[in-house]
């Protein structure tokens, strides 16, 4: 990703708004943008979801492949999660091999899902030591107006929850829905004008400092954390956004449940 | 092009597996302005193909060596998302997508008034989210709609459509099975107002008569598809 010039005016404007407890698009400090979650949107994927957060739009698609289990884990299948932000998603994203930014995106989402244990890798084994399922989760952005992390995180878990294991296509039995036992949710906070806000848009990302991503599981267990970009934060600041993340993640979990109808 | 004649794809009434007649095109929808951060955009569904196109620019062309003193350069990228096909596609450029990007650029350069924007670059990003058959045609057609949505001056839109041959019958707009097991494929890019061509490929086996029929089917289908494109642009506020 090419980093555009950050105008001093933008940073000054964001700071001034922050001192009056305002944001550049009029939201409150902990308010997210309008969000919509659609499932089963991609005909060729075994599971899929589309998330729109303001002007940020992303897709997640699940595919399955047969793999040979790793010798040290003969009873386990695999989960692979990758994010691609191609130049379609914005003028600053460039073609070529995956950028550090998109690799970070994929890995942070991957950790949240993997470490929550929502997918039982043992259940992905077909014949121990010989044949197992590899679940491949591809995250794909088509419009980046900030906070791709949360959009990807939400699309990822929703797509997994709609996935059907394509046994018939691979001639290993009957199709069945992938068992996803938990709903890990990521919430991201950006330091803008010297205080953290939830769900930063592209302008806030550009004129802001560090960001913190928190993935929480069903019982508010912490499954992944990531601090990104240059910046210093205090334990008190972290404690505050952690409390906010607990509230927000349970709201988003309800959204996922209501869209999936369970 | 399997060329295996043992799969019956045309029934005794001349109807195809999906119930279409020989000249009938799959259902098409077009929507403009679907990518809020782009300067112009378009989503086109055609059968179960689902393609989005974003336009960025005209913008400064960099590095400088790609600049042209007298015109803009078109930077066209065609790509299939990893989940767009039955078997997952490994991300990254491949020979096929590179060739399609090139012929799409060649087609669009023939209609965009590039000389109005010297030293600049216009990016055309074609992303296939779901592929059935004929994605290069969908990509080219949708790209011309997205360019119009971006307000970039062109002499005409480009309508791209393919006809081919299955079970020795010439049919328009091949679907997945017809594309896999058919005997020929002739994609064309037609300028609807003049009837001229900016894109042409073909593979397979067609007699001179079959070739003419396929050609005529494409020209006829192009004029139908053009109406849908114009309607979508009007609805999106472009005249």
Image (cartoon, coloured by chain):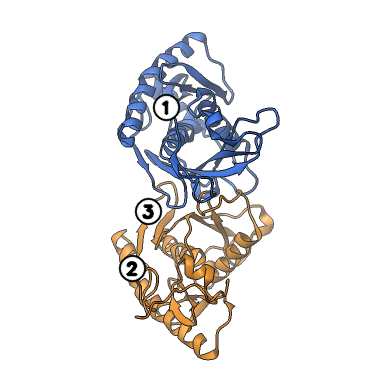
Chain colours: A blue, B orange
Marks 2/3: CA–CA distance? 16 Å
Against A262, residue B145 (above or below) is below
- Judging depth in this view, the residue of A150 and B194 nearest the camera is A150
Q: Do tag 2 and tag 3 residues touch (Cβ < 8 Å)?
A: no
Chain under disc 3: B
Against A85, residue B22 (above or below) is below
**Helix, strand or loop under label 2:** helix
Instruction: Indicate the position of residue A243 as horizontal and vertical percent values.
Output: 40, 14
Quadrant of the image containing the C terminus of chain B? bottom left
Q: Residues within 10 Å of mark 3 (few under 14, many from 20)?
A: many
* Residue that badge 3 annotates: B33
- Judging depth in this view, the residue of B152 and B193 nearest the camera is B193
Instruction: Indicate the position of residue A30 as horizontal and vertical percent values.
Output: 36, 22
Residue at 45% from the left image edge and 65% from the top image edge: B144
Q: Residues within 10 Å of mark 2 (few under 14, many from 20)?
A: some
- Judging depth in this view, the residue of B79 and A60 nearest the camera is A60
* Residue that badge 2 annotates: B228
> Residue A50 got which mark?
none
Quarter-wise, where is residue A122 in the image? top right
Residue A256 seen by the camera? yes
Chain under disc 2: B
């Amino acid at each position: 990703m090419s980093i555009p010039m950050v105008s001093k005016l933008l940073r000054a404007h964001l700071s001034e708004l922050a001192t009056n407890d305002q944001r550049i698009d009029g939201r409150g400090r902990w308010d997210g943008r309008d969000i919509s979650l659609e499932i089963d949107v991609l005909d060729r994927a075994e599971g899929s979801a589309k998330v729109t957060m303001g002007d940020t739009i992303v897709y997640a698609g699940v595919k399955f492949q047969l793999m040979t289990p790793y010798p040290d884990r003969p009873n386990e299948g695999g989960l692979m999660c990758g994010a691609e932000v191609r130049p379609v998603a914005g003028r600053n994203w460039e073609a070529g091999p995956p950028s550090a930014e998109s690799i970070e995106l994929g890995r942070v989402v991957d950790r949240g899902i993997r470490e929550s244990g929502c997918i039982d890798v043992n259940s992905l084994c077909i014949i121990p030591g010989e044949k197992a399922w590899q679940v491949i989760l591809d995250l794909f952005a088509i419009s980046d107006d900030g906070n791709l992390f949360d959009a990807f995180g939400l699309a990822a878990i929703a797509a997994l929850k709609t996935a059907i294991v394509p046994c018939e296509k691979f001639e290993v039995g009957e199709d069945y829905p992938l068992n996803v036992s938990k709903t890990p949710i990521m919430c991201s906070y950006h330091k803008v004008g010297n205080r953290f806000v939830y769900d930063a848009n592209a302008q806030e990302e550009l004129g802001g400092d560090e960001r913190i991503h928190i993935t929480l599981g069903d019982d508010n267990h912490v499954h992944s954390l990531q601090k990104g970009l240059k910046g210093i934060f205090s334990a008190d600041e972290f404690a505050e956004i952690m409390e906010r993340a607990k509230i927000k993640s349970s709201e988003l979990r309800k959204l996922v449940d209501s869209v999936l109808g369970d | 092009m399997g060329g295996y004649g043992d799969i019956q794809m045309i029934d005794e009434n001349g109807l195809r597996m999906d119930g279409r007649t020989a000249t009938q095109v799959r259902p098409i929808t077009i929507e403009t302005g679907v990518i809020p951060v782009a300067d112009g955009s378009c989503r086109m569904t055609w059968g179960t193909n689902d393609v989005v196109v974003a336009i960025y620019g005209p913008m400064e062309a960099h590095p400088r060596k790609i600049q042209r003193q007298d015109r803009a350069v078109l930077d066209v990228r065609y790509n299939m998302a990893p989940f767009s096909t039955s078997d997952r596609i490994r991300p990254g450029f491949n020979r096929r997508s590179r060739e399609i990007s090139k012929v799409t650029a060649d087609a669009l350069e023939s209609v965009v008034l590039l000389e109005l924007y010297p030293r600049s670059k216009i990016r055309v990003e074609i992303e296939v989210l779901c592929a059935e058959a004929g994605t290069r045609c969908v990509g080219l057609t949708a790209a011309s709609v997205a360019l119009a949505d971006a307000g970039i001056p062109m002499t005409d839109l480009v309508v791209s459509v393919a006809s081919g041959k299955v079970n020795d019958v010439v049919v328009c707009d091949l679907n997945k099975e017809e594309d896999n097991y058919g005997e020929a494929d002739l994609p064309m890019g037609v300028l609807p107002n003049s009837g001229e061509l900016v894109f042409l490929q073909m593979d397979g086996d067609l007699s001179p008569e079959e070739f003419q029929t396929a050609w005529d089917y494409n020209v006829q289908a192009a004029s139908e598809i053009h109406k849908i494109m114009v309607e979508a642009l009007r609805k999106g506020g472009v005249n």
